[in-house]
Amino acid sequence: MQKRTAEEVEQLLKGYEESGLSRLEFCQRAGIPVTTLDYYRGRSTRKAAAQRRVAGLVKVTLEAPPVDAQRSAFTLTLANGRRIESAWTFSDSDLTRLIRIAEGA
């Protein structure tokens, strides 16, 4: 079994893509088994997909909420299972109205 360098594999794949030949024809001319070409193609595809996934990531920085927001934060779980989480301070009438609207939806 011949061990190929990454550059050799890349050239082989490029040659196949540019040849316009079927896999079998290309492999016969290149003197390699079709399974080897398929292996290289699959590995290349998986590697490209992994690079696309990494390229789509965005770095974020998390910060703790202000101390005042932590003190006034609350979670209200309604009868229908919905949750309202907020750091806002509501008056009694506003909170009652919010619950009525959420329970009705």
Image (spheres, rainbow, N blue to C red):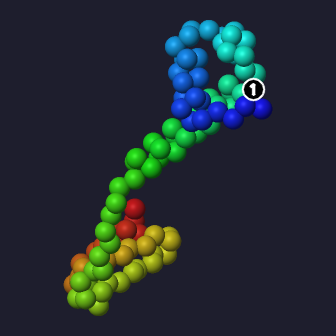
| Residue 57 appears left or right of 46 | left
Rendered residue at 52%/45% (across/down)? 50
The picture quadrant where one finds residue 68 is bottom left
Residue 94 appears in the picture as rendered: yes
Count of numbered badges drawn on the protein: 1
Q: Which residue occupies the foreground of this view, 67 or 30?
A: 30
- Which quadrant of the rendered structure holds the C terminus? bottom left
The picture quadrant where one finds residue 7 is top right
Question: In the displayed structure, would residue 39 be above or below residue 69?
Answer: above
Q: Which residue occupies the foreground of this view, 14 or 91?
A: 14
- Residue 55 in the image: x percent, y percent? 40, 47
Rendered residue at 36%/76% (across/down)? 85
**Counting other residues with Cα less than 10 Å from the Cα at mark 1, is it few (<14), some (14-19), or many (20 or more)?**
few
| Residue 28 appears left or right of 81 | right
Q: Which residue occupies the foreground of this view, 23 or 28?
A: 28
- Residue 66 in the image: x percent, y percent? 24, 83
Rendered residue at 32%/72% (across/down)? 62
- Residue 81 in the image: x percent, y percent? 50, 71
Question: In the displayed structure, would residue 20 be above or below residue 73?
Answer: above
Question: In the displayed structure, would residue 23 be above or below residue 77?
Answer: above
- Which quadrant of the rendered structure holds the N terminus? top right
Q: Which residue occupies the foreground of this view, 7 or 25?
A: 7
Disc 1 residue type?
Thr
| Residue 40 appears left or right of 101 | right
Residue 99 appears in the picture as rendered: no
- Residue 96 in the image: x percent, y percent? 30, 79
Rendered residue at 69%/32% (across/down)? 39
Residue that numbered label 1 is attached to? 35
User: Which element is circle 1 on?
Assistant: helix
